[in-house]
Amino acid sequence: MCGIAGIVRTDGRPVDRAALARMAARLVHRGPDQEGFWPPAGAASSGQQAIGSPASAICAGLAVRRLAVIDPPGSRQPIANEDGSAVLACNGEIYNYLDLRAALAARGHAFRTAGDAEPLVHLYDDFGEAFLERLVGMFALAVWDARQGRLLLARDRLGQKPLYWFREAWGLAFASEPAALLECPDVPRSLDRRAVGAYLRFGCVPAPATGFAGVRKLPPAHYLVFDAASGRLHGPARYWEVPRGPADAAARPAEWRERLRAALAQACGAQLAADVPLGVLLSGGLDSSIVAALAAAHAPGRLRTFTVRFAEAGWDESPYARAVAARLGTEHTEIAVEPRCLEALPELVRHHGEPFADSSNIAMYYLAREARRHVTVALSGDGGDESFGGYPRHAAMWMSERIGPAARRVLGAAGRLMPPRPGRKSRWNALRRFLAALDLEPLQRCLAWRSLFDEGGLRALLAPDFAAEALADDPLGAWREALAGLESRPWTDRAMAIDLADYLPNDCLAKVDIASMRHGLEVRSPMLDHRVVELARRMPLELKWRARAGRTPQGKAVLREAFADLLPAEVVSRGKMGFGVPVSDWLAGEHAEWMRSILLDPGARSRAMLNRPAALALIASHAARRADHGERLWSLVCLELWLRTFRL
């Protein structure tokens, strides 16, 4: 696991090695163990590679900050092939590297290290960009090919590792975090208003936007090639996608359960490979409990598990995590998360580098910090909700598909007449939100159940001139692309596909990556092994959902049934609580003045973006506990802090 950065110049100027060093320094938390540059310090021409005539001279430089997990002393990066004509910088872990290494050795390749990165540069030698299809793992990588004068950038299939890039006439720069990319003096800082509009709608910025005009993040399962010799950019292009078309109804339920259990056991076993201490982030939910059970069965010695604890009722899952730890016999640690933990927010804003409003990153920050004191690698349960149906909005879609059009019209009108009440986890508010969207088209229902603000609320909040540009994009465009080929699937399946393509990489995995890598903790997710994801997509929907008399339907049925023998019964049967923090209570209580001081500061950078009376009304309504606007206000706080941090 690492932080990577690089610059390729096509204007005949040398790479600014001081700038490259600053880019690497911004990533030291991601790779505290080693620093590496290519070309090495003192190399002739600062990495200049003559391509064609002298007038077309190209300069390239790569930097890596390494967290040493496999082959700690030996596998330094950047790492080159045998003749030095191709150089790799990789952030991530490749779980099938031993198989790749054996196959490459049989083809005549010679290895200098025992790590998981070196096989990739040899694989590129043999297969070009098609080598990506052979990788099992999480990664963001760069390959500089001096023979052809081109740079390849790629990101893993599900988006566990981030990669940001900027292209201009002078060349291209890239880095693992925006703050590092901005250390390149040729990368400007200017606001992308449309990205801000998307952020206020979803609480994060969907790829490829970032919040900075011209700065892009590579989408999951994509690569791009910068042909420095010609100055052309090819891509981003997709190299993998989740299976499309109808589900496979041929196999029996018992066969699906056996396949799932075998696939997850294989993924978990592969991800236990490490030359450093390893543990599990155990929330007490079904997914992380399954991962903990599989890890405990295969890990050498006694497994360590870690969970967070809240004092506020309705937010604390630690009793369930404690029960799982007792069942598995793990060495268990609990970390208390309290309102004072907001002290970490400015640091998180800087490392995210783009607007980000998922408040659970606070809990993840402290969980990762404590875990890192004991282990260097931790497994998590991320990915189970998106593949097997774990979110309340999936249950809402399942129920809405069973209500006729006439009833949906009546119930939708009734829902819009229900007044809001305080409390983020209020059942009244959940019912109100569900009903109010029922008479919309299915894709619009997905949007309503996902958005922080409804369309009217968002337009009322924003100043008219800002809203005209910020809300110009179609929020459903990327979702329609994710749904191509799934027209025969039920809308519940399609809602899960949207979350897999959008919410998972842009929110959940971004949160985990930033909060964990801030402390040099590598988090691996067996549920995100692409073979597990492919298996889940092929399953019929009825394997994942169970109707329950008088209660909402329950997702993840196949997971519950396949692993019931490994876990406490109360964990197998419990519903989704969600990994979050009680930010609504904090912002209506002891941190209300803190919030007001940020949002109502006369010098606030977001002031010109907002309709001030609407913002004041939002604050007053939440403070008086007439309605719950905690997550909306949190998004405004995070936006203001981001604007200040990056001087926008």
Image: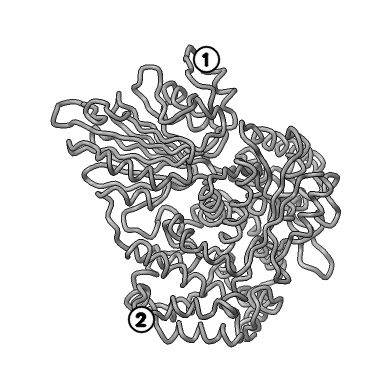
Identify whether 231 is placed above or below 121: below
Residue of label 1: 105
Residue plotted at (57% across, 18% down) = 102
Amino acid beneath label 2 = Pro
Residue of label 2: 602
Q: Residue 451 location, x and y as percent?
A: 54, 69
Q: Give neighbour class at mark 1: few <14, some 14-19, many 20+ (Cα, 10 Å).
A: some
Residue plotted at (55% across, 27% down) = 71
Q: Is residue 533 shown to the viewer in this render?
A: no
- Of circles 1 and 2, the one toward us is 2
Amino acid beneath label 1 = Ala
- Farthest residue in the left direction? 55
Report the front residue among 560 and 585.
585
Q: Residue 153 location, x and y as percent?
A: 40, 38
**Distance from label 1 to label 2 (Cα)?**
65 Å
Report the front residue among 209 and 276.
276
- The answer to which of marks 1 and 2 sits earlier in the sequence is 1
Q: Residue 49 location, x and y as percent?
A: 24, 27
Give the number of the disc on residue 290. none
Residue plotted at (80% across, 51% down) = 324
Identify whether 381 is placed above or below 56: below
In the drawing, does residue 10 fall left or right of residue 180? Answer: left
Residue plotted at (46% across, 57% down) = 206
Report the front residue among 143 and 588.
588
Q: Quadrant of residue 600?
A: bottom left
Query: Dot 1: what SS?
Result: helix
